Image (tube, rainbow, N blue to C red):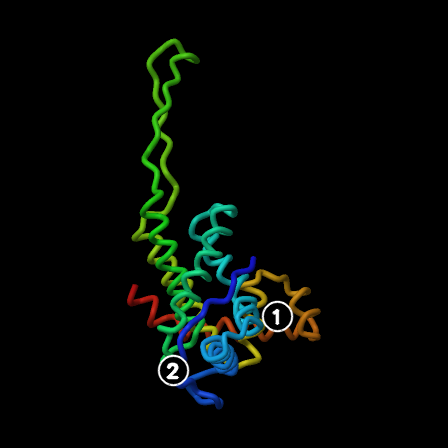
Amino acid sequence: MSIAAPALSASADFPTTTTKKFSAKALRDFALIERILDHHDERAYSELMGHYQKAVYQLVVKMVHQSDVAEDLALEVFVRAFRSLHTFRPEFAFSTWLFRVATNLCIGHLQRHRLPTVSLDAAQFTGEETSFDLPDTTPTPQEALIQLQRIEQMHLAVAKLPAKYQQLMQLHYFEELSYEEVAERQHLPVGTVKGQLHRGRDLLHQLLAPAQRSI
């Protein structure tokens, strides 16, 4: 997918050096956002979108359960995000802000398109007045919000892990690569990948436990 880069106003001051608060990935995003806002740099715009295109689509499709609808919604996420990019402030990582845009868009879509229970008249098959109730499996807006909050918390928690675990978790859980594919991508033995993912999961559970109790 491609979108023309928007003309936006000058950016706020962004951190430029590694701090305890921001990961290297977050600082990379800040630099790209500055180039977009200050110089209308279309290459920076395309690069920033490329970093999150797959993750946003996967988040959306898990909520709406329709791949064709998810493609349109994922595109709209980026349209909305980049139209509002001048409002982004670097108190949080760009990924946090972007996933919130996706969250709000999905909830709005589910609220507008939730289908009622359907009754089908089966008289032509039985000779009697018979109806079948087909339950709607689309999540309610409340259910969608809870699921999206958990997905968002997962992304935020992974971003807090040590760098060697972050990338493995991203590839295996968010991009859904197999152990073997992750090992090939990272040039690591499969056993090392499994061991580091196991340790990463333990750390992730510790990070997520307080947040999950609050939902």
- Residue that appears at 62% across and 62% down: 177
Residue placed most toward the observer, 206 or 18: 18
**Would residue 37 appear left or right of 194 to someone viewing this image?**
left
Disc 2 + disc 1, Cβ < 8 Å: no
- Residue corresponding to mark 1: 194
Residue 171 point in image, percent of width and height: 58, 67
Q: Nearer the viewer, mark 2 or mark 1?
A: 2
Farthest-out residue, top:
127
Q: Residue 168, located in which quarter of the rendered image?
A: bottom right
Q: What amino acid is at disc 2?
A: Ala
Indicate left or right for 180 with 209 as reference: right
Disc 1 element: helix
- Left or right: where 152 falls relative to 46: left
Position in image of residue 22 (x %, y %): 44, 83
- Residue carrying label 2: 12
Q: Which mark is residue 79?
A: none
User: How many residues crowd mark 2 within 10 Å: few (<14), some (14–19), many (20+)?
Assistant: some
Query: Quarter of the image containing the C terminus?
Result: bottom left
Q: Quadrant of residue 207?
A: bottom left
Of mark 2 and mark 1, the one earlier in the sequence is: 2
Quadrant of res 180: bottom right
Circle 1 Cα neighbour tier, 10 Å, few/some/many (<14 / 14–19 / ≥20): some
Instruction: Classify 44 as above or below 79.
Output: below
Q: Residue 3, image x and y in percent? A: 52, 61
| Residue 179 vs residue 92, the one in the foreground | 92
